[in-house]
Amino acid sequence: MSPAIKYTLGRIGLFLLVFAVLFPTPLNILVKAMIAFVASAAFAFILLRKWRDQMAEHLGDMASRRSAEKARLRSALAGDDVAAEAGDRVAAADAERATKPAPESIKADSATTESVATDDSEAGSAAAAGAADTDEALKAENKSDAGK
């Protein structure tokens, strides 16, 4: 069970326990709930310290993993080939497929696809060059708009 869920359930359990103890007293129900909330927070500070520390450690680990992944993605977007290869799941899947032997029917289809792919790659590279020019023009336009 996740430390955050365990700690949260512990806090709720303490609140319900204190509220149940206060239930027979002749106070308004909202006053009982407020007293139970404050008292359960104090008890949780003392009694649930171990679970709170586990939860904080777990959340810290998750935050460090996210920041490392974010840094890797930023460096990959900046053009760092090593970072891009380290996190490129598509390339890893392609490498796995390349090492496995393909069935005969797929080999025959891939020979046909390769001849079509070479023709399409020339058209695709021209389209990519046009898209890059369009992106540069949009960036220049945005910069000029930002200065106004």
Image (cartoon, rainbow, N blue to C red):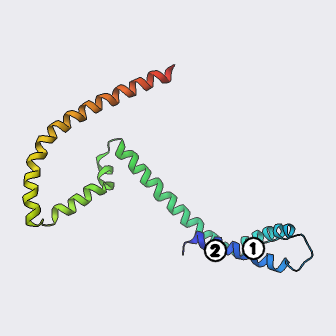
Q: Residue furthest top?
A: 148
**Which amino acid, mark 2?**
Lys
Residue 76 falls left or right of residue 22: left
Residue at 47% over, 22% down: 145
Q: Residue furthest right?
A: 26
> Which quadrant holds the N terminus?
bottom right
Residue at 50% over, 61% down: 62
Could you say where residue 96 lies in the image, as x and y percent from the top left? 21, 63
Residue 4 falls left or right of residue 77: right
**Alpha-carbon distance for marks 2 and 1?**
18 Å
Residue at disc 2, secondary structure: helix
Could you say where residue 90 lies in the image, as x and y percent from the top left? 28, 55
Q: Residues within 10 Å of mark 2 (few under 14, many from 20)?
A: few
**Which amino acid, mark 1?**
Phe
Residue at disc 1, secondary structure: helix
Q: Nearer the viewer, residue 144 or 106?
A: 106
Q: Residues within 10 Å of mark 1 (few under 14, many from 20)?
A: many
> Residue 74's image quarter?
top left
Task: Give the answer, above or below, for where 139 lies relative to 42.
Answer: above
Q: Which residue is mark 2?
A: 50
Q: Quick check: marks 2 and 1 in contact, CB under 8 Å? A: no
> Which of pointers 2 and 1 lies earlier in the amino acid sequence?
1
Could you say where residue 31 lies in the image, as x and y percent from the top left? 87, 67
* Foreground disc of the pair 2, 1: 1
Residue at 13% over, 46% down: 117
**Which mark, residue 91?**
none
Residue at 16% over, 41% down: 121
Q: Which residue is mark 1?
A: 15
Could you say where residue 110 lies in the image, as x and y percent from the top left? 11, 56
Q: How many marks?
A: 2
Q: Nearer the viewer, residue 54 or 105?
A: 105
Task: Give the answer, above or below, for where 85 lies relative to 79.
Answer: below
